[in-house]
């Protein structure tokens, strides 16, 4: 089944949610249809919060709030699945989360489980592995930025049947994009890393985000690649069935040939397991 997958890469204005919504609208103005759009981590608020008070000012509960409304509006307008990162308020805690809006109005959510650097001072880590969601754009697993360096995140989603890994990111390290080649190949699925660009100079620190968002295929081929410094939406038309072909020759199956007797069995996430 052919699907049009895409990502948005842009400069995020810290604390200016409406400006960032408008930027995404502008980037999408020439698009009529897209099946899946992935936007970066914390992409409407900015990343480098000075303290938890700033997080509190910009955090929203899942499903109600300006970010949910915006994502649901985009999902309805493009008949698309739309995924973006946002600071989530849940009870008296804050999470670095991403939300998936479906054209039906349904919403799914994932709270980042591996917090990077100062994120540990700002957010609680999610305490549930991501699950696979069956959508009109394919079976999608969400992971957020630094989750990439723990291959069991991508692996558990592949075991649970994901065809696409949606990977909203705010990358500052320069080598994740190359490492995602391995996540794609070892799991034989599509990966979409949506990264932001620009620099945040806040609280005496300067963080520059590395852009180079990409869509990789199940054999590691680059299907779309953004530069490190420009605002773009890029897409790739893909055959989802290729991601189901885990039998790489008559002897070796990427999931079933694992030696769980020697190496353990990573928890299979997957309330929506196919
Ligand atoms: C990161 O996890 N934002 C590097």
Image (cartoon, grey):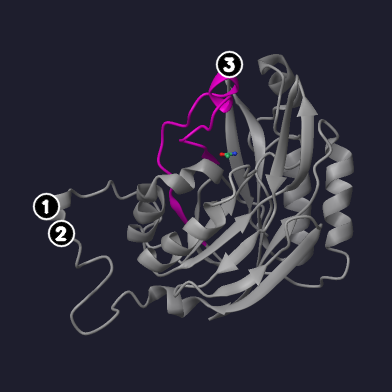
Mark 3 or mark 1: whose residue is earlier in sequence? 3
Closer to us: 186 or 42: 186
Give the alpha-carbon distance from disc 2 to disc 1, as whole Å: 5 Å
Which mark is in front, 3 or 1?
A: 1
Q: From where the camera sits, is residue 140 visible?
A: no
In the image, farthest residue toward the left:
261
The residue under the point 70% across, 19% down is: 56
> Residue at the spot x=18%, y=80% of the render?
251
- Residue 125 sits inside the magenta stretch: yes
* Prevailing SS of the magenta stretch: loop
Q: Which residues are magenta?
A: 110-134
Residue beneath disc 2? 259
- Where residue 124 sits: x, y (%)? 52, 24
Mark 2, Cα crowd under 10 Å, few <14 / some 14-19 / many 20+, is: few
Packing grade of label 3 (10 A; few <14, some 14-19, many >=20) is few
Per the image, the residue denoted by label 3 is 92
Q: Nearer the viewer, residue 168 or 159?
A: 168
Q: Which residue is mark 1?
A: 262
């Amino acid at each position: 089944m052919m699907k049009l997958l895409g990502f948005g890469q842009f400069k995020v204005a810290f604390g200016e949610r409406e400006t960032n919504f408008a930027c995404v609208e502008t980037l999408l103005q020439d698009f009529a249809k897209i099946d899946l759009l992935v936007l970066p981590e914390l992409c409407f608020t900015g990343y480098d919060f000075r303290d938890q008070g700033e997080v509190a000012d910009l955090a929203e509960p899942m499903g109600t709030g300006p970010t949910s409304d915006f994502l649901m509006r985009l999902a309805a307008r493009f008949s698309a699945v739309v995924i973006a990162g946002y600071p989530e308020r849940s009870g008296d805690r804050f999470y670095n989360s991403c939300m998936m809006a479906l054209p039906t109005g349904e919403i799914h959510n994932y709270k980042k489980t591996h917090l990077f650097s100062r994120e540990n001072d700002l957010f609680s880590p999610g305490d549930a592995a991501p699950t696979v969601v069956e959508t009109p754009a394919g079976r999608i697993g969400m992971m957020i930025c630094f989750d990439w360096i723990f291959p069991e995140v991508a692996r558990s989603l592949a075991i649970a049947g994901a065809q696409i890994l949606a990977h909203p990111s705010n990358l500052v390290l320069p080598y994740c994009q190359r490492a995602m080649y391995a996540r794609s190949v070892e799991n034989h699925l599509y990966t979409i890393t949506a990264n932001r660009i620009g620099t945040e100079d806040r609280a005496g620190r300067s963080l520059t985000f590395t852009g180079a968002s990409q869509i990789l295929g199940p054999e590691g081929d680059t299907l779309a690649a953004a530069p490190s410094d420009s605002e773009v939406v890029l897409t790739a038309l893909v055959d989802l069935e290729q991601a189901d072909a885990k039998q790489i020759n008559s002897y070796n199956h990427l999931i079933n040939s694992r030696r769980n007797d020697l190496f353990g069995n990573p928890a299979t996430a997957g309330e929506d397991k196919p």
